[in-house]
Amino acid sequence: MNRIALQMLTGDRAKYAGIIMGIAFASLLITQQMSIFVGLMTRTFSTISDLGQAEIWVTDPKVQFIDDVKPLAETKLLRVRGVNGVEWAVPLYKGLLKARLPSGAFQTCNVMGLDDATLIGGPPEMVAGTIQDLRRAEGVIVDEVGARTRLAKPPARPGEPATPLTVGDTLELNDQRAVVVGICRVSRTFQSQPVIYTTYSRARRFAPRERKQLSFILAKAKPGVDPAELCARIEADTGLSAFQARDFQFKTVRYYLKYTGIPINFGMSVVLGFLVGTAIAGQTFYNFTLENLRQFGALKAMGASTWSILRMILLQALFVGLVGYGIGIGLAALFGRATRGTELAFRMLPQLLGITALAVVLICILASMLSILKVIRLEPAIVFKS
Amino acid sequence: MQIASQLAVVCRDIHKTYVTGSTRTAALRGVELEVRAGELLMLVGPSGCGKTTLISVMAGILNQDQGDCRVFGENLLAMRATQRTRFRGQNVGFVFQAHNLLPALTARENAAVPLLILGVKRAEALRRAEHFLELVGIPEKAHVRPAQLSGGQQQRVAIARALVHSPRLIVCDEPTSALDHVTGQKVIELLRQVALDGERALVIVTHDQRIFPYANRIAAMDDGRIEHIAEQTPLAVSQSLARPLEP
Ligand SMILES: Nc1ncnc2c1ncn2[C@@H]1O[C@H](COP(=O)(O)OP(=O)(O)OP(=O)(O)O)[C@@H](O)[C@H]1O
Ligand SMILES: [Mg+2]
């Protein structure tokens, strides 16, 4: 009977394709929307994840997320260094500064000032120059995308593409000259301003005069010291907040989820994808069963139990669900591949596939439920109706 | 004959009323009828008199409201639904007006469906289905789908399907009405010759007067009752169609 069920399903190629397409479309939409959502959320904390060396982030207690900088007094750095179990602790400057481009235009940049001695907190990947070049006078490292787009120099002749900023070029940060000594590659951030790396002391010079300029303290636990315990100890000793990098990432994501409309908007389009998919797939599948009602009636008359017919319908639903799901997530993966390296945030976590699978199962159950109700109530006497 | 006098179906005072919303249609109003084992009984009468309803009750696919219907001594109404379904699967063969073949299945697979429902292994079921396709004269169509068959050929597949599991009762609703005269006659001859075998009873609902001569008895129905029953010597099946019967 299972074989008959599948033959019924694939017998009408056009209808079969229709049902599959419906489910594939739903899977694609759901997976794709969720992946973009995850991709965007990943960007919110990319500053933290790019900074792999920092095990522990020490911040002002009121800091809510990575871009919420509340400067600390310089003395706090010594306090943190003094906490038992700290291997090292270094300052990090992070701030938005206006860069004056050769064209005369201004561009707000995310400036990262790294500890002068160790240069801890540098970019994850260099494209030109090395991180050590920051030791040269007035040196800054600019991120590749920023150099190519917002920081690019005006074209030599009008109508031509802009020339990317390269090593040796200069720009002004708060009226102070800076020389590009390197180009780096960073993960895209949520606000996606150009990122400029320099040393901590130089960043302080670039930044407007303020009483406190230390944005974060990055620290590492001594070998054998539990980072969680160390965080607690730092908080107790200094009155600051201390997070393990992963916890700071979650805190940042939670902030975005809570205070921006992103989750709702994306939730809506995921739900919409689900509804549209269910409607299309459910509708075609229900129609399919309706048209086969007579055949099911004949099977019932000839001695097939209601249960065995339900099994046939469930098998059909499962089969189209599986095939449609496969096609859908395949397309989503292709989509992700095709958009790699573009502005589009896309991160297809394995968990998302599980969620999509659940959604497809739900779609199939919903779609077959209607059909099943019909079949349970089906009178086999229908077969004698012409 | 001793076998012929055994009763396949006994209907006593069968009533059935359809209720659709506020309208009630009394389709059967006290049917008295016996179908003998080994006979071909035709059920005739004006449209809407209850013929289809009656054979639905006899075949166990519709419950009467009142009265007693025994099929080979079994009271179908007293059975649980699952039992009744199994009883149908084992004992009843159907030939419908609209042949109700599954379009996605080949002739051979269609003919094998009752066996597959009973849980017979696929290979064995297909083998037996092929035998019956041979019997109804279309062995060469075994791998063809219904859409590529003529109306008469489709009805032959339906007959093979009704016979394949050797049921003791076969009910047919207007088996020839969708066919031209010559084809219809061939189909009824086939039914007489192949289906009517030993104690098997055959009940055929028909409007088609041209096939009346093939019946052992003709029961005339009107307004939900059997009006009268005529007994006759059935017309012999023409030689051209006669084929040796194999077990
Ligand atoms: N499912 C149903 N619901 C309501 N009324 C029905 C139903 N089936 C049949 N009827 C009514 O019951 C009566 C008997 O119907 P039935 O189909 O048994 O007649 P019939 O003798 O087979 O007619 P025909 O020769 O046209 O096939 C008719 O009046 C019909 O309208
Ligand atoms: Mg009828």
Image (cartoon, rainbow, N blue to C red):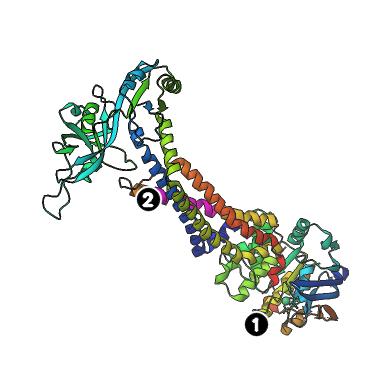
User: Between residues A132 and B156, which one lies in front from this camera angle?
Assistant: A132
- Using residue B219 as the reference point, say whether residue A185 is left or right of it: left
Residue type (three-letter) at the residue carrying disc 2: Phe
Give me the chain letter of mark 1: B
The extreme left residue here reads: A157
Q: Is residue A347 visible?
A: no
> In front: mark 2 or mark 1?
2
Residue B59, quarter of picture: bottom right
Q: Is mark 1 within 8 Å of ligand 1?
A: no
Disc 2 is placed on an element classified as: helix
Residues A216 and B57: in front is A216
Query: Which residue in the protein does label 2 denote?
Result: A335
Which residue matches tag 1? B182
- Quadrant (top left, top right, bottom left, bottom right) of the N terminus of chain B: bottom right
What are the residue bounds of the magenta stretch?
A319-335
Whether A186 is drawn above or below B34: the answer is above
Quarter of image, res B178: bottom right
